[in-house]
Amino acid sequence: MNNKVSLKKHLVLFLLLGCNTVAFSQLGTGISARKPALPTYSTPYVIPTVKDVKNIVDRIQQRVEKNSLFYLVDSINGQTISYSQPNKNAIYPQGAFYFIEWSYPNGVSLSACNDLYETTNDTTYFNYAIRFFDFTFKAMPYFRTMEENGLIRHHPYKKMIHMAALDHCGAIGAALKKSRKDIPTLDSGNG
């Protein structure tokens, strides 16, 4: 039985080598010399310029800024609310939740904002990251209090308050560190 398995292995290897030999022997004979068909794209494939990339990044940043509404409203009367008293009707304006949530995707985006600032010196990106974190640390205690009082169950800072996975702190924690590196802290001896 061992001989049959060995014979089969050798036969398969022989056939593979034979096929490769035939394929290589036909190089330059016209069979393999044809150019492969190039795919056609609806958008022409060109190497983008720095200006092209900046325009795309700016368009994305404008969309993010437009949807990152850093305030809360009362779902009953639509009025902007303060953080002085818990309000079970507190919500973010339509569509803002995912742009201000403590999450992995936002951490990646905020890290990109810091990198874009360092690359372009355009403070628009850096200022957005600072506004995001300033609002987060203002709103999170409010939502924690409301959660503790049983007024809400789901909110954008749930993963921040109840960290249970690396995705709850890794990317966004790195973005926080990047955006706050120039601000003195107590542990740096400067604050």
Image (cartoon, grey):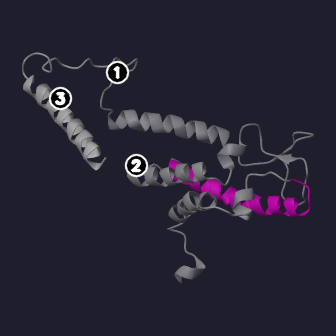
Measure how far apart labels 3 and 2 are at the Cα level: 54 Å
Measure how far apart labels 1 and 3 are at the Cα level: 38 Å
Whether label 3 touches label 2, CB < 8 Å: no
**Badge 3: how crowded within 10 Å, few (<14), some, or many (20+)?**
few
**Badge 1: how crowded within 10 Å, few (<14), some, or many (20+)?**
few
Q: Which residues are magenta?
A: 125-152
Which kind of residue does numbered mark 2 sit on?
Thr
In-image side of 64 versus 114 (left or right)? right
Asked if the stretch drawn in magenta spans residue 178, the answer is no
Q: Mark 2 falls on what kind of element?
A: helix
Residue labelled with disc 2: 120
**Badge 2: how crowded within 10 Å, few (<14), some, or many (20+)?**
few
> What is the number of the mark on residue 44?
1
In the image, residue 163 above or below residue 26: below
Residue labelled with disc 3: 19
How far across and how far down the image is residue 117, in percent? Answer: 45, 52
Q: Mark 1 falls on what kind of element?
A: loop
How far across and how far down the image is residue 127, in percent? Answer: 56, 53
